[in-house]
């Protein structure tokens, strides 16, 4: 598992940015598993939630962004979803920018060794930033390929 459950706090004031980020990651990781089911895909489209997922992917960073892009990629195999995604020019531009920025980052860092699970946060092993960025790049590339084919 990528993330362990967060500890419960007694009041909203005790919630830290790190706890909120962990909750976002857990939520989208669960959604990533759910969108694999046809009924869930259809319900997301029926409820017009795809636009919200795209908006969240544009605001989130790191692992939460990666998981959201994986959800959107899974949904993009549905023709109705693919059409909705294609119509969002801001999102398509962002995907293209991810590819451009990742290529230049990779050129700068091509000699650096990447340890896949290099850091621990609150006893949870998480992928390094380099691995997450690589996965975000793969999802952007996969989405563009799927939408342009």
Image: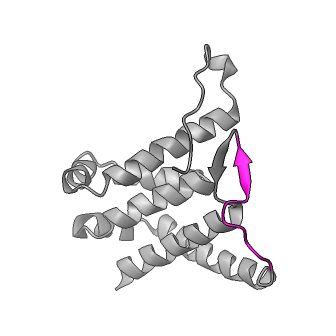
- Tell me if residue 120 is in the magenta stretch: yes
38 shown above or below 97: above
How many marks do you count on the picture? 0
Q: Is residue 137 visible?
A: yes
Q: What percent of the width, then of the height, locates residue 41?
A: 25, 55
Residue furthest toward the top?
Answer: 10
Q: Quadrant of the C terminus?
A: bottom left
90 shown above or below 48: below
Rendered residue at 31%/54% (across/down): 35
Q: What percent of the width, then of the height, locates residue 62?
A: 63, 56
Specify the segment rendered in magenta: 112-121
Camera-side residue: 85 or 65?
Answer: 65
Q: Is residue 69 left or right of residue 39?
A: right
Q: What percent of the width, then of the height, locates residue 141?
A: 50, 78
Rendered residue at 23%/65% (across/down): 80
140 shown above or below 14: below
Rendered residue at 62%/14% (across/down): 11
């Amino acid at each position: 598992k990528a993330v362990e459950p967060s500890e419960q706090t007694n009041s909203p004031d005790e919630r830290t940015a790190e706890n909120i980020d962990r909750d976002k990651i857990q939520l989208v990781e669960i959604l990533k598993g759910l969108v694999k089911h046809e009924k869930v895909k259809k319900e997301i489209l029926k409820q017009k939630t795809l636009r919200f997922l795209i908006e969240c992917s544009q605001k989130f960073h790191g692992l939460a962004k990666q998981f959201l892009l994986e959800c959107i990629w899974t949904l993009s195999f549905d023709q109705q979803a693919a059409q909705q995604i294609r119509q969002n020019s801001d999102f398509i531009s962002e995907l293209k920018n991810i590819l451009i920025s990742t290529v230049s980052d990779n050129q700068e860092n091509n000699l650096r060794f990447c340890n896949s699970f290099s850091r621990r946060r609150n006893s949870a092993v998480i992928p390094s930033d380099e691995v997450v960025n690589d996965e975000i790049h793969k999802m952007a590339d996969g989405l563009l390929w799927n939408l342009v084919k």
